[in-house]
Image (cartoon, rainbow, N blue to C red):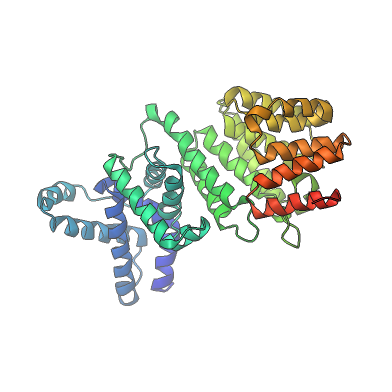
Amino acid sequence: MDARAAVDETWRTDAAGMLGVLARRLGDLDRAEEALQEALAEALRRWPSDGVPGSPAGWLVTTAWRKALDAIKREATGREKVAVLARTPPDAPTGDDRLALIFACCHPALPEAARMALTLNAVAGLPTEAVAAAFLTPRATMAQRLVRAKKNLRASGVRVEVPPEDELGTRLPAVLTVVYLIYNEGYLVHNEGHLAREGLDLARQLAHLMPREPEAAGLAALVELHEARAAARFDDQGRLVLLEEQDRSRWDGAMIRLAVGRLARAAALDRPGPYQLQAAIAAQHALAPSWPATNWAAVRALYDRLQLLTPSPVVSLSRAVATGFVAGPAAALDEVDALAERLSGYRLWHATRADLLLRLGRRDEAAEAWRRALALATNPAERELLTRRLAALGTE
């Protein structure tokens, strides 16, 4: 392997661990990142002639450590700080270092958008340009956001470390939320699946790094079940295809089996949580031979359990879809209409009403509900789908 390929491969597989171990020891993510970038540049200068070292990640961490100490020495209070740091140089990066970096990037001290951007940049290793493109943001704006995020972490005294056991339960949900949001950013974007892939990879990493945390496994299973349907989510013209209309032969059976097995192992830990329940609902859909043959009673029961854990009108709306198949569209419409005060500004509330109204033969009302949904939708794929629905009714 040549030097450039070795550097690229090491960055792809070990960036988060290297950044994590350096930031933990230096107490500063920004400084760790600068030092590691300098080490990468030195590797590109030296490895072509010296050869790729046996442990590329260890070499880069050691070189970055030395460069960070040199930078600290040049500061006014640097000598004393260097003396303290030099006593315990960093070890080679481990899974704990990667996990510590994830928790730091997802710290509640940062706004949600900053958490997502920093996680993609520092943990997933995406360059600023790629993160900016993913969020349709100018590069300069994203660069400023990342700089502010690192400064906020430093100013808030956030350490790059795995939270102690007594804090893990309160900190983990924020991490899982960021990873799921990253996946969802790419979920409905045709031919631009890199964000969805990063979200899937991050979810799997968390499940691997935290094998005794069933909610981490639940999130990984949920994302895998969503991703297993990716090939059928858009038609040949790039148009969104709803779950009930998808060609199930195009689903990834191996990934579905992997996710269901992962979910079963999580359930065996007997600590149910919202991601496990959402994954269990997705599994019911993934294992059903068709949309009508779905076990709707089981789906509705799972939504009942989810509502107990995380009360939400959106959960109630999803439950109403199952009610439509268990008790009929009229009963489901009653449930949906009961949510009007809380969800009248939510596009999926109107879309769900439209489907139920159409099943009841109330075409004009269904068309009006779809118009309301279209007015609220921002995703291009969703807007195109809603426009098609309206056209099929002979209206616009």
Above or below residue 97? Residue 69 is below
Extreme bottom residue here? 49
Question: Residue 110, located in which quarter of the rendered image?
Answer: top left
Query: In the shown orientation, is residue 55 left or right of residue 349?
Result: left
Indicate the position of residue 198 as horizontal and vertical percent values.
53, 53
Indicate the position of residue 343 as horizontal and vertical percent values.
65, 32
Seen from the viewer's position, the closer of residues 240 and 48 is 240
Seen from the viewer's position, the closer of residues 96 and 340 is 340
Residue 55 is at least partly visible in this image: no
Look at 40% across and 61% down and name the residue there. Answer: 140
Residue 61 is at least partly visible in this image: yes
Look at 78% across and 53% down and name the residue there. Answer: 388
Extreme right residue here? 361
Give the position of the N terminus as an image quadrant.
bottom left
Question: Residue 290, located in which quarter of the rendered image?
Answer: top right
Indicate the position of residue 317 as horizontal and vertical percent values.
69, 31
Seen from the viewer's position, the closer of residues 200 and 190 is 190
Question: Residue 305, located in which quarter of the rendered image?
Answer: top right
Above or below residue 272? Residue 376 is below
Look at 57% across and 42% down and name the residue there. Answer: 220
How many numbered marks does the figure carry?
0
